[in-house]
Image (tube, grey):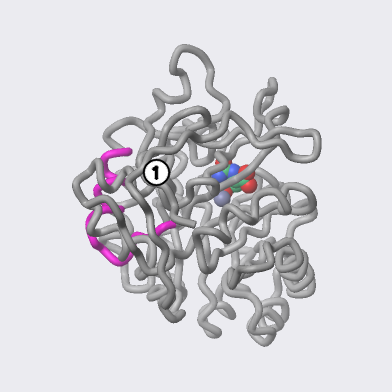
Amino acid sequence: MNSLTLTRPDDWHLHLRDGAMLQAVIGHTAARFRRAIVMPNLTPPVTRTEQALAYRARIVAALPADTDFEPLMTLYLTDQTSREDIEQAAGSGAVTAVKLYPAGATTNSAAGVTAIERTYAALETMAEHGIPLLVHGEVTAPDIDVFDRERVFIERVLAPLSERFKTLKIVFEHVTTRDAVEFVRAARPGIAATITPQHIRCNRNALFAGGLRPHHFCLPVLKAETHRQAVLDAATSGNPRFFLGTDSAPHSRASKESDCGCAGIYSAHAGIELYAETFEAAGQLDRLEDFASHFGADFYGLPRNTGTITLQRKPWRVPARYEINGEQLVPFMAGEDIAWTLQA
Ligand code: NCD
Ligand code: ZN
């Protein structure tokens, strides 16, 4: 097979940032995806509906002229998020989901949730209105090993939460462990997970290949090979609980190559091609369309897309960097070849 036509896919986990970075990255996503769930971890975070509407307008203004790309907006959950905040979000029709960042878990999460009990009123209201909770699933307790944070989050937070709010839809974002995929497989209805390209392609050795590799640093951090294999198996299993979310997370080169480098891997430049290559290597290319274009929309209760994209089996070289307003952005697979090319 030298050409692959898919229903236009959606990206169910994306960081677009703002200003010059937004302007520079949005075209990559819009060329590939019809919709994307846009994460709210700006500074300051998008905690209220007015902010989400204003951010949506800035995204739409940054879009290339000839696109029908649609940003799906999210709110950033805090200890202070009230019933009224959720009712306003539901009433606006412009907020698709709410994101839980445990305080201190990742980039711009300082304003996140300090204790899950503080969000119960908001979660109850979300369940009433059918608004999904998107979860960054890592505990932040300093005594927990960084590689165990996801597993411990399931035990301490996610499993009890999913039982307490039985009708709340939950997406366990960017799962990275065997524990997480096993949890999602066995969970009650209404629980799903997104999977990134890096977590099905790389294990934690990539962080230390010949030296320290900041461009492979993201959160949750890459895991051991057994976990990578389990997450890849889930992505390619045909189970509708697992769907595409790139977690493309651009940071400038200077802020990655630093003595305290930011977490985040930029992958929107090849946001579907990376998955195509990996699914093919796993012998499961025929399962890509469900994962990339069907299961996420079905979970969110949104219509499947009607258009298509076509990939050609033709290698292309990922640039070493993109220049953005005097800064640089180093993409995932910089300087390497990817086997599938998006047809213009
Ligand atoms: C994300 C970012 O940079 O905003 N970073 C990351 O490593 N994935 C935040 C997140 O999704 O955790
Ligand atoms: Zn993210």
Question: Residue 28 in the image: x percent, y percent?
Answer: 58, 52
> Relative to residue 32, is residue 60 drawn left or right?
right
Q: Is residue 140 visible from the viewing direction of this image?
A: no
Residue 123 in the figure: left or right of residue 184: right
- Residue 71 placement: quadrant: bottom right
Give above or below for 167 relative to 26: below
Q: Residues within 10 Å of mark 1 (few under 14, many from 20)?
A: many
Judging from the image, what secondary structure is the residue with disc 1 in?
loop
Image quarter of residue 51:
bottom right
Q: Quadrant of residue 322?
A: top right
Residue drawn 70% across and 74% down? 82
| Residue ID at (40%, 45%) | 274
Magenta-drawn segment? 228-244
Q: Answer whether residue 231 is magenta in the image.
A: yes
- The residue to which callout 1 is attached is 176
Q: Is mark 1 within 8 Å of ligand 1?
A: no
Q: Nearer the viewer, residue 317 or 223?
A: 317
Residue 119 locus on image (x, y percent): 62, 66
